[in-house]
Amino acid sequence: MEDKFYNLALRFLSYRPRSEKEVREKLESKKVESNIIEKIILKLKEKKFLNDEEFAKGWIENRNRFKPRSARLIKIELKQKGIKEDIFNKLISDKGLMINDLESAKKLVKKKMEKYRNKLGITRDEIYQKLGRFLASKGFNWDIIKKSIDEILAKGV
């Protein structure tokens, strides 16, 4: 019986990396007994299929590369995945994973500016408002939003 649930956990992990909390919740949803869940989690950790620190590192890298967001929003996402704050703090203090909110925001503004460049009749104020709302939805604070939009508009990008 344990093997059946272990294989279920492996299949769940095969789609994308998961946090320990996600695997635990998946097994709980299948009504697996808690002592069996603990054995499976331990086995997955021993075989290095489950590692919250590696999961968080991959999540941060993925967000920085493909879906830039503020460090604050990434931290919230990881917390929802069951990643402890000390793991997050350790990872962002690592120079390779440093999340620079200003750079992320500027990257998003440049990308969005492509959309507005060829629109007729759109004013600078309207662009500013649209970009501001967009960046706010990505978790950036007002200072970062203002700096990033100002820098990109000043360059005329």
Image (cartoon, grey):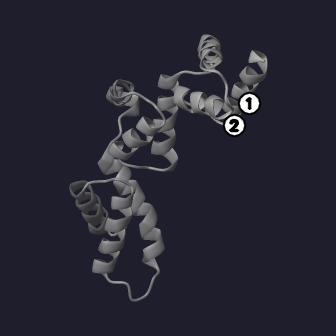
**Residue 17 placement, left or right of 155:** right
Given residues 157 and 43, the one toward you in this image is 43
Few, some or many residues within 10 Å of mark 1 (<14, 14–19, 20+): few
Few, some or many residues within 10 Å of mark 2 (<14, 14–19, 20+): few
Q: Secondary structure at mark 2?
A: helix
CA separation, marks 2 and 1? 7 Å
Eyeballing the image, is 40 above or below 132?
Answer: above
Q: Are marks 2 and 1 in contact (CB under 8 Å)?
A: yes
In terms of image quadrants, where is residue 27?
A: top right
Nearer mark to the viewer, of 2 and 1: 1
In terms of image quadrants, where is residue 138?
A: bottom left
In terms of image quadrants, where is residue 34?
A: top right
**Residue 56 placement, left or right of 147:** right
The residue that label 1 is drawn on is 11
Q: Position of residue 118 (x, y in %)?
A: 47, 80
Q: Secondary structure at mark 1?
A: helix
Q: Position of residue 111 (x, y in %)?
A: 45, 62
Amino acid found under the numbered disc labelled 1: Arg
What residue is drawn where x is 48% and y is 44%? 63
In the rendered image, the quadrant that contains the C terminus is: bottom left
The residue that label 2 is drawn on is 15
The residue furthest left is: 143
What residue is drawn where x is 33% and y is 60%? 136
Q: Position of residue 9 (x, y in %)?
A: 69, 26
Given residues 79 and 55, the one toward you in this image is 79
